[in-house]
Amino acid sequence: MFEQTFKNIDDILWKDSGADSELDYIGQTSWIMFLRYLDDLEKEKKDIKELSGEEYTFILDEEYRWNSWAMPKDKDGNLDHNKALTGKDLVKFVDLKLFPYLAKFKQNTDNPLTIEYKIGEIFSELKNKIQSGYNLREILEYADSLPFKSSKDKHELSHLYETKIKNMGNAGRNGGQYYTPRPLIRAMVNVIDPQIGEKVYDGAVGSAGFLCEAYDYMYERMNKNVDNLKILQEKTFFGKEKKNLAYVIGIMNMILHGIEAPNIKHTNTLAESIRDIQEKDRYHVILANPPFGGKERKEVQQNFDIKTGETAFLFMQHFIKSLKAGGRAAVVIKNTILSNSDNASVALRKHLLETCNLHTILDMPSGTFTGAGVKTVVLFFTKGEATKNIWYYQLNPGRNMGKTNPLNDKDMSEFIKLQKDFIKSDNSWSININDIDETTFDLSVKNPFTPDEAELRTPKKILEDMETLDKETKKILASIKELV
């Protein structure tokens, strides 16, 4: 039922001239689902208040509640066609009245942790792109059929929403920046092992995949009492996101996973000077995949001790500074961080090794990130103790990775198993930090069990080999010609 509903909504959006990509589909689905969710949330809170003899004050004025504009119903519970807006009237109401009204909520509260603030943020940043009021009317009817009340319903909806996020990433363009393969995230969370009472942070939150997986991991393992549930809801997960659409998707994803008012701020993380980060701003756990390849302006670079235009390298400095002493981090990053010879890269590696225990480097195969075209590693480190030994693991799934052969949980199982005790294998090895070059701090992945010839063949040697093979081929062809 749920899956078909999502497909029907996508089919309608595909027909509409205002939404022309997977990015648009999920953005438009998100704001509609959010208002549908908000309606159920308000009804639930009203029922709880009335049971205790109290009166509930609605967040939204009556004109802007779901049952007033989206799905007014008659006494039999069916859509009241006499009251329901459609066509141009519906689009005009949404664009000129609903969105401006909801956007004003941001001005009415300065607490970003409230549902009111989230409403204001979302509708300040998004626009309705559905141009046909008849298409919008159909979508609203499908959305009305989605139940948000039981945890089972939310679990199924969250699974389908994750699928939409994945499809958006696979669609290319800039969608991929929001999606990290969930098997990789689950492996990272498993190694870091966040515990109830710890604060978990992602400063490049995207679609909130890391926070959602950490929530599932912690929820499954904790004692289910009122105090723990409150801590998990309100005091555990924190994030920051710069991009408008990603912010909305992240909020919706966390809501579907059971977090009522996600602690995600809509801000440019790198605009904050790391010198202003105090103990109260630090976290026990950091899980993140900062954007690759971005370039930051000179004024942003001034917020960091190590100046570089590479966005991901600035994020690394932010993460190190944002960890509490003894805090644990797992960060996906381009593998060039291990070997770049420029001054900033060398300084960053030196800083990481001297201030943190970089105990594990996970080397991911090409194709892990669909369409990204970059090689990545995952750095696992603990703050407060210098690095002595580094355990490397080179993931080798035995197939070419890509859209049709994505990463799965089985691929990650050996890594998780061996990492616990830093066990050596054909795919894993350790180095002593005293053995690295202290002028470059080069940490390149060099599997000692890989034949040198395959790993170290130079371009010159490759050309020589090609020339030799070409000569051999000519000889074979000449021999065949003689025989004929």
Image: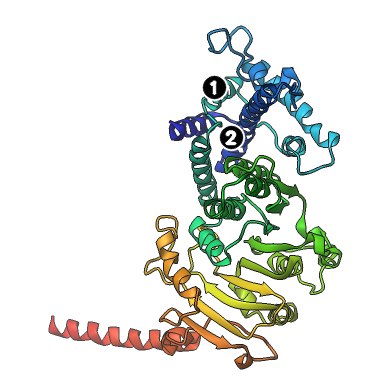
Q: Amino acid at mark 2?
A: Thr
**Residue at label 1?**
141
Q: How is the image coloured?
A: rainbow
- Asked if one can make out residue 173 in the rendered structure from this viewpoint, the answer is no
Residue 363 image position (x, y, % from top left): 52, 73
For badge 1, the amino acid type reads Glu
**Which of 109/192 is in front?**
192
How far is disc 1 from disc 2 in space, using C-alphas? 12 Å
The quadrant in which residue 439 appears is: bottom right
Residue drawn at (76%, 39%), measured in percent from left and top?
A: 114
Residue 24 image label: none
Provide the residue designation for mark 2.
29
Residue nearest the viewer, comparing 137 with 394: 394
SS at mark 2?
Answer: helix
Is residue 387 left or right of 398 when viewed as pictured? Answer: right
Q: Residue 135: which quarter of the image? A: top right
Of label 1 and label 2, which has the lower sequence position? 2
373 in relation to 471, above or below: above
Q: Mark 2 Cα within 10 Å, few/some/many (few <14, many 20+)?
A: many
Residue 212's place in the image compared with 40, above or below, is below
Quadrant for the N terminus in the image: top left
- Residue 403 pos. (x, y %): 44, 55
Mark 1 touches mark 2? (CB < 8 Å): no
Q: Is residue 295 left or right of residue 362?
A: right
